Structures are given as structure tokens and as C-alpha cells.
């Protein structure tokens, strides 16, 4: 059975996929390469490929999806299937890139928890009884990764390449998935991506925002099971 490589979002680690790792780890090898050591998407993708199996299923959420698109651009022959979750195929706009600068300044001044709490977390999730627990985990992951990771990842996102041409060349089974209430990467953006990928399947997870893997884990597992079972 093909290994599964999971790429987490900005300032997240493997805990972002905790329920999915528990489920799929029973039957297949799971790989969780870090996305914290470089400040370009291209270099991050090269590192993923350096340590990944020869042939693998690839899933990424948010920044992880951005890196996943670069991985399949660099080595399409190694990726057996692709899942892009709550992500964005476009280059960063100048306004969003500029908005990252005050965040970087604050983080370098020792205010990482404040940046995560006040500027980023309110946009992440759908309302619901489990929202606070997920937000607490998001903050815990960010603090554990630290200020250097935040700065490098911010720089990588600012300079990220447009991947529309990459999407049009993808021929493997592809799942495009997002939370119905994701305001950072809304449904329309995923419809746009799904139209570019030949034979892509678009799935929208109800009662979820930017982190459906934690907000609605069972629904995401069901969609991933279908995706992993699809004929290549």
C-alpha cells in the first residue's frame, strides 16, 4: 500500500492531522516532513522530496497544499495521488505580502502568541462547541515551532509561485477539499482549482472552516478514504 505524505499548514505540525494519522496509520506508512527549515516554497518542496518515499500519495492543507503543488511540479512521476485542502494555487498578492511584514516584526519582538491569537486565529475556524479546543491546539503548535519558523514560512508564502500551470498538468487522482466556512481560502478558490485539474473531485466539508481535519475529522477521513481508493 502506497505511503501517505502529509504536509501541514503554516505554524502547524503533525497534530493538524492527528485523527487522520490515527486512522490511516493502521494500514499504511505515514510521513510528516517538516516545513520549517527554508524560506522558499521551492526549497521546502525539495526537502520533502529528499526524504519522501520513491512513490507516494500526497496531501497538504493550507501552506502544506502550496508546498504539495510545488512537489508535484518538481517530481510528478513520484506522486501517485494528490489532495489539496483549504489552500491557494495563486501567488501572494502584494497587499497580503505587505500585511505579513508587521506580523513578522511583532513575532521577532517576542510576540508570537499575540500574533497567533489576535491576528490569525479568529479567521481559522467555523463556530461550534469544539472551536476553542482546536484554537488552543493551533496556538500550542505555533509556540512549539517558534519564531524562526514563523518568519521563514511567512517569507516563503510572500514569494510563492503561481501554480495554475501545474494544476493543468496533473493527471493523478486529485481531491480538492475545503471547509464550507473557510474565509481564508473560500470555496470559490477551490472551485477554481478543481476546474483546472483534469478529473479532480471537489468536496466541501460542512460546519468547518480552515482546519476541517480537526473541526470535522470523520468527514475528512471519509473523503480521504475514497480518494485513496480511487484508481490511478
Image: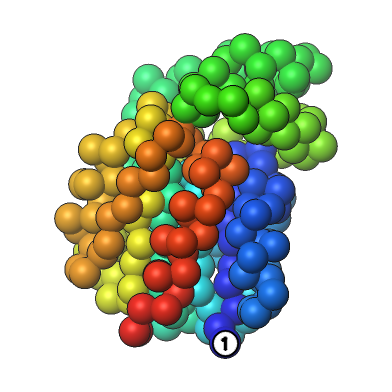
Residue 3 visible in the shown view: yes
Image x and y of residue 49, in percent: 59, 71
Q: Nearer the viewer, residue 89 or 2?
A: 2
Image x and y of residue 197, in percent: 24, 63
The residue that appears at 23% across and 38% down in the rendered structure is 188
Horizontal arrangement in the rendering, residue 136 relative to residue 162 (left or right): right
Residue 210 vs 230, above or below: the answer is above
- Say few, some or many: other residues with alpha carbon within 10 Å of mark 1 (under 14 / 14 to 19 / 20 or more): few
User: Where is the C terminus found, in terms of image quarters?
Assistant: bottom left
In the structure shown, which secondary structural element does the residue marked by tag 1 occupy?
A: loop
Residue 74 visible in the shown view: no
Image x and y of residue 125, in percent: 51, 28
The residue that mark 1 highlights is: 1
Residue 126 vs 59, above or below: the answer is above
Q: Nearer the viewer, residue 134 or 173?
A: 134
User: Where is the N terminus found, in terms of image quarters?
Assistant: bottom right
* Image quadrant where residue 106 sits: top right
Specify the farthest residue to the front.
Answer: 129
The residue that appears at 62% across and 69% down in the rendered structure is 24
Q: Nearer the viewer, residue 123 or 108?
A: 123
Residue 126 vs 87, above or below: the answer is above
The residue that appears at 68% across and 53% down in the rendered structure is 18
Residue 136 vs 72, above or below: the answer is above
Check the image and tell me how it is coloured.
rainbow
Image x and y of residue 88, in percent: 37, 43
The residue that appears at 21% across and 69% down in the rendered structure is 199
Horizontal arrangement in the rendering, residue 94 relative to residue 136 (left or right): left
Horizontal arrangement in the rendering, residue 150 relative to residue 70 (left or right): right
Amino acid at each position: 500500500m502506497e505511503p501517505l505524505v502529509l504536509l501541514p499548514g503554516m505554524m502547524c505540525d503533525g497534530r493538524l492531522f492527528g485523527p487522520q494519522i490515527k486512522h490511516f496509520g493502521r494500514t499504511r506508512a505515514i510521513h510528516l516532513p517538516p516545513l520549517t527549515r527554508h524560506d522558499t516554497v521551492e526549497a521546502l518542496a525539495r526537502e520533502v522530496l529528499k526524504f519522501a518515499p520513491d512513490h507516494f500519495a500526497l496531501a497538504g492543507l493550507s501552506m502544506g497544499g502550496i508546498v504539495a503543488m510545488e512537489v508535484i511540479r518538481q517530481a510528478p512521476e513520484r506522486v501517485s495521488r494528490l489532495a489539496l485542502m483549504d489552500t491557494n494555487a495563486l501567488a501572494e498578492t502584494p497587499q497580503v505580502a505587505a500585511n505579513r511584514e508587521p506580523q513578522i516584526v511583532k513575532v521577532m519582538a517576542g510576540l508570537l502568541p499575540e500574533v497567533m491569537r489576535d491576528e490569525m486565529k479568529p479567521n481559522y475556524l467555523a463556530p461550534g462547541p469544539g472551536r476553542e479546543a482546536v484554537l488552543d491546539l493551533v496556538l500550542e503548535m505555533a509556540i512549539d515551532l517558534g519564531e524562526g519558523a514563523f518568519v521563514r514560512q511567512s517569507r516563503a508564502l510572500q514569494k510563492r509561485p503561481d501554480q495554475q500551470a501545474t494544476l493543468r498538468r496533473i493527471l493523478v487522482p486529485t481531491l480538492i477539499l475545503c471547509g464550507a466556512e473557510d474565509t481564508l481560502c473560500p470555496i470559490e478558490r477551490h472551485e477554481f482549482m478543481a476546474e483546472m485539474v483534469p478529473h479532480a473531485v471537489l468536496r466541501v466539508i460542512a460546519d468547518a472552516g480552515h482546519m476541517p481535519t480537526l473541526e470535522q475529522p470523520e468527514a475528512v477521513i471519509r473523503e480521504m478514504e475514497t480518494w485513496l481508493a480511487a484508481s490511478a
